[in-house]
């Protein structure tokens, strides 16, 4: 039986990937059961399922091949779910009817948990004439606000958290408003934003030329290209958005340039997709394929890599047939092109095991060699599949072989594709792997560097207490096992010690042999000069990247996680995003009879566990007295909006207890209470004391040491597990403690 190398890995499996019945009782008793379930389901579409089930199982065993979380959680469950993570939706028509039909399709897709990408460049700019109604257009950003509200509404209805990507062309007349949109900390929080940057624009920037903003053949404004570029750079420097997508490069290198035009990506950017395109993801765990780690003989087993890639391609191709889709257009698109996105995780750990420093020239060269080997094996495997099962329906040999990426392939691969066809139009992508990397034993994520060699997390026990647990990077753990009490060698870098251009070099090296794209974050120090920051994006352009996403600590999105600094914060601090509501909560209902009031008031307070401490999460206040209706509803909504944000919410009690009714209060149980609101505050206070959230009457959270937490890391709090540990990686805010990702 396989053993999880870390407690957090087993916890991730149990929470996210383990099959359970409707009552929450496990059906998968071991992780081997989960692997067998997935292997059996994906082999079921084969002509001879028994011949492939064991091979698929062997690929999954020991966490060597890691299908995306949707596949691990959904395959073989019998549930009506999609195994695809993200979608780019259809082109938005420039009409009211078309826009709201697109909104409906987005809602149906997000209802099933799919992240979506949209290009809003097709909507006419603000102030443009709307013929036939004697009105001016409100512009694409006004409709993005509608999309944002839709996403929040679906989330509030209890659906799985979704993410959205919005793109806009650099020549759209509203591009400056798009660039500045998220400088308002309350606006478009459900979106990631990226500017579609063209080759012509980048040349105009370098030449200092003017740049026209146009729509439907009309020029609305002209400004210096460098001025617009500086606006993009300043926004992402100060607010971490928008990102930049080099859209012409994406289309030029697309194997399917003859059959589609791409104008958007999935939310994290690793899959540029056409209208109704879907992304199907999986990762080879390079760290598991290293032999003789930390010795002069250390090497990656290239024969094992080749075999694993070939099996993984077949498994992922089968997902196209095994999966369901939210919309019929998505199913048709997926089956016409059979796109898959096979990537890697554990790259940084594998480099460490070979004695290579992430970001150094030799590490970039090694990364390029590994990615080339993966691409070759994937394309040869897909050609063999085409000979067996048929090429993808839109395959055109001459057009395909003349595409930009295929021209990089060697003669053996090109001849195989010409002779046999190819099963999958595109095959490689490097996606965010934060959660599945934790599940695999905390290997480094995707092609990102090791974020932290180790950190401490607090784990809630069944009895309500909590214990501290050290979470150690996989390569660090292996080094410690082999070399106890020996300091880490100098090549053990982490995300905090890297220069931004080291990130660019690694992304560019990998991109050379990835036919789709890469989700990666280039973390920049807060004090990086603006001109140096701009150089990061120019380096990404010059070195052949398809896009660039950076993260610099800022006031809107928070600071990057710091490691190794002890900090104490009452109750975990305030959350920028409220905690998700679990399906069931524990609580209590109190009856309050205020003298002079004909009907009693009933106060229900439900609680949640945060950082090992029970704390109030929501309040419901009801009464038969219709005179109380408006203010009890208002109070219910206000308090229930405050409590899920965490932090010292005991101030609510103090504010309510301080309210005096000018008509006079009442004596209750020998104590003068100045108003009904003060009485409600007293009830909430007694509940807080009863659950141990505050120590006693008149005491706030900050004065109660039992409700404080101490951690070895500080940073933004996770809206899922409430622990400090959110950091930007692979284009998405991700939690080190529970694997939660804003993009998943």
Image: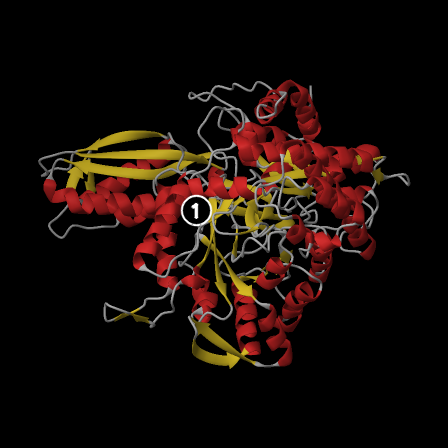
- 143 vs 35, left or right, is left
- The quarter of the rendered structure image containing the N terminus is top right
- Give the percent coordinates (x, y) of residue 444: 69, 43
Q: Is residue 37 above or below residue 624?
A: above
- 422 vs 171, left or right, is right
User: Within the image, what quadrant is residue 580 found in?
Assistant: top left
Observer-nearest of 546 and 361 = 546
- Give the percent coordinates (x, y) of residue 628: 14, 43
- Give the percent coordinates (x, y) of residue 73: 53, 30
Element marked by disc 1: loop
Q: Residue at x 36, y 61 (%)?
A: 94
Q: Is residue 269 above or below residue 484?
A: below
Observer-nearest of 244 and 720 = 244
Q: Residue furthest right?
A: 296
Q: Residue at x 74, y 54 (%)?
A: 408
- Give the percent coordinates (x, y) of residue 88: 49, 49
> In this view of the protein, can residue 349 be seen by the observer?
no
Q: Residue at x 85, y 35 (%)?
A: 292
How crowded pointer 1 is (Cα within 10 Å; few <14, some 14-19, many 20+) is rated as some
Observer-nearest of 507 and 576 = 507
Q: Which residue is mark 1?
A: 647
């Amino acid at each position: 039986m396989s053993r999880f190398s870390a407690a957090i890995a087993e916890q991730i499996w149990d929470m996210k990937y383990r099959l359970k019945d409707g009552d929450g009782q496990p059906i998968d008793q071991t992780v081997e059961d989960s692997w067998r379930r997935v292997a059996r389901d994906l082999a079921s579409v084969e002509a001879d399922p028994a011949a492939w089930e064991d091979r698929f199982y062997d690929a999954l065993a020991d966490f060597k091949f890691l299908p995306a979380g949707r596949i691990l959680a959904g395959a073989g469950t019998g549930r009506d779910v999609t195994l695809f993570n993200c979608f780019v939706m259809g082109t938005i028509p420039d009409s009211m009817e078309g826009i709201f039909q697109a909104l409906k399709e987005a809602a149906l897709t997000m209802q099933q948990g799919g992240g979506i990408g949209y290009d809003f460049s097709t909507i006419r700019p603000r102030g443009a004439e709307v013929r036939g109604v004697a009105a001016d257009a409100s512009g694409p950003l006004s409709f993005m606000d509608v999309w944002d509200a839709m996403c929040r509404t679906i989330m509030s209805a209890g659906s799985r958290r979704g993410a959205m990507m919005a793109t806009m062309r650099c020549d759209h007349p509203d591009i400056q408003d798009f660039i500045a949109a998220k400088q308002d900390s309350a606006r478009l929080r459900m979106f990631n934003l990226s500017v579609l940057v063209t080759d012509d624009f980048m040349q105009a920037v370098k030449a200092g030329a003017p740049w026209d903003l146009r729509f439907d053949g009309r020029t609305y404004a002209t400004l210096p290209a460098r001025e617009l570029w500086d606006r993009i750079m300043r926004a992402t420097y100060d607010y971490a958005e928008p990102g930049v997508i080099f859209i012409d490069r994406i289309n030029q290198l697309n194997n399917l340039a003859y059959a589609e035009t791409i104008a958007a990506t999935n939310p994290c950017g690793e899959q540029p997709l056409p209208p109704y395109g879907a992304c199907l993801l999986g990762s080879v765990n390079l760290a598991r394929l290293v032999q003789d780690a930390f010795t002069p003989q250390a090497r990656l087993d290239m024969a094992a890599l080749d075999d694993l890639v070939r099996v993984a391609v077949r498994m992922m191709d089968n997902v196209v047939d095994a999966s369901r889709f939210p919309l019929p257009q998505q199913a048709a698109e997926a089956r016409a092109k059979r796109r898959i996105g096979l990537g890697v995780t554990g790259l940084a750990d594998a480099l460490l095991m070979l004695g290579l420093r992430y970001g150094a020239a030799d590490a970039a060269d090694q990364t390029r060699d590994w990615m080339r080997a993966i691409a070759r094996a994937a394309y040869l495997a897909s050609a063999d599949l085409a000979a067996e099962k048929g090429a993808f329906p839109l395959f055109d040999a001459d057009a395909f072989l003349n595409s930009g990426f295929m021209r990089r392939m060697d003669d053996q691969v090109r001849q195989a594709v010409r002779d046999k066809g190819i099963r999958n139009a595109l095959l490689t992508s490097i996606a965010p792997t934060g959660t599945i990397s934790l599940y695999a034993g905390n290997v480094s994520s995707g092609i990102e560097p090791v974020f932290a060699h180790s950190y401490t997390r607090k784990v809630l026990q069944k009895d309500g207490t909590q214990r501290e647990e050290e979470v150690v990077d996989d390569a660090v753990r292996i080094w410690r096992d082999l070399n106890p009490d020996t300091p880490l060698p100098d090549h053990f870098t982490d995300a905090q010690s890297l220069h931004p251009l080291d990130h660019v070099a690694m992304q560019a090296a990998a991109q050379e042999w990835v036919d789709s794209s890469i989700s990666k974050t280039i973390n920049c120090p807060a004090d990086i000069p603006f001109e140096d920051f701009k150089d990061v994006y120019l380096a990404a352009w010059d070195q052949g990247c398809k896009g660039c996403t950076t993260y610099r600590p800022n006031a809107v999105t928070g600071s990057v996680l710091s490691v190794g600094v002890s900090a104490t914060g009452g109750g975990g601090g305030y959350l920028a995003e409220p905690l998700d509501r679990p399906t069931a909560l524990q609580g209590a209902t109190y009856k309050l009879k205020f003298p002079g009031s004909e009907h009693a008031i009933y106060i229900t307070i439900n609680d949640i566990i945060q950082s090992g401490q029970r704390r109030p999460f929501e309040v419901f206040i009801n009464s038969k007295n219709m005179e109380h209706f408006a203010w009890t509803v208002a109070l219910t909504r206000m308090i229930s909006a405050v409590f899920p944000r965490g932090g010292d919410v005991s101030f609510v009690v103090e504010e309510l207890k301080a309210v005096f009714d000018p008509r006079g209060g009442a004596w209750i149980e020998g104590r003068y209470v100045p108003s009904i609101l003060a009485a409600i505050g007293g009830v909430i206070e007694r509940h807080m004391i009863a659950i141990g959230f505050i120590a006693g009457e008149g005491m706030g959270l900050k004065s109660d040491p039992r409700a404080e937490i101490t951690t070895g890391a500080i940073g933004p709090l996770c809206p899922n597990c409430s622990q400090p540990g959110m950091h930007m990686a692979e284009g998405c805010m991700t939690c080190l403690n529970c694997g939660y990702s804003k993009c998943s």
